[in-house]
Image (cartoon, grey):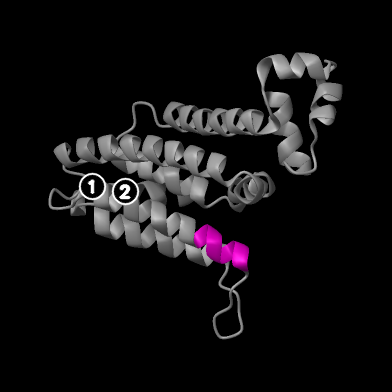
Amino acid sequence: MMTANGLFSKDGVREVSIDDICRKLCISKKTFYQYYAQKEDLVADVMAYNVERKKDEFERMVEGKNAVQVLKAMFALVGRKKTMDKDKRMVKDIMKYYPETFIKRAEDRSKALHNFFVDCFDTGRKEGLIRSDMDVEGVQLLIYIMHEGMAEYLDGGHRIEGKKVSFKSLSAAFEDIVTRVLLTPKGFEEYSSTDNCKNS
């Protein structure tokens, strides 16, 4: 799994053949076909592996943290363009050559993120950090749409008045909009003071 994931990330899904994977693992194609009927089945497993790995990594990172701290961690990740770029080639290949597999795994990823953030925001409301009048499910969906739209904009190379808006500018605006909409005055004060501590 990890070997195939590494090859797909480095060279692209389309370019990596079953023969390449077998050579890297020092196994025969007969052995490969004992586990997978076709390459697409391996691609589906690699996507599922990445969804679960990233979810587990983030949950470990924010374990024991309140809603404000979870948002800080989320925007710290969003603010790293390398994180967004890392698996871009592999994702594009899967979207193009295995669209049904991509849609299914993208839905799994969306559900996992959705459930995590809805639970987190519900807890934040009880703590007085998240606005009680907000539809947390709607806000979580909006965050997802905005993030995907930002990635698509950057990938498409769109220009405004002949200039491309920088990644830093987009991610800062994204963070400002979400925190001001979602957090109570108490939550926003904690969010801002954490920022000040970080910058001092």
Q: Secondary structure at mark 1?
A: helix
Residue at image point 28% right, 47% down? 190
Residue bearing mark 1: 136
Which residue sits furthest bottom?
161
The x and y percentages for residue 178 are 33, 57
Q: Between marks 2 and 1, how big is the CA–CA gap?
A: 6 Å
The x and y percentages for residue 44 are 59, 32
Residue at image point 37% right, 38% down? 111
Is any atom of residue 200 visible in this view? Answer: no
Which residue sits furthest left?
133
* Residue placed most toward the observer, 36 or 198: 36
Amino acid type, callout 2 = Gln
Picture quadrant of residue 42 = top right
Q: In what quadrant of the picture does the N terminus appear?
A: top right
Residue at image point 40% right, 32% down? 62
Amino acid type, callout 1 = Val
Picture quadrant of residue 50 = top right
What number is the disc on residue 140? 2
What number is the disc on residue 128? none
The x and y percentages for residue 194 are 37, 46
Task: Please tell me whether residue 4 is drawn above or below residue 95 in the rendered image.
Answer: above
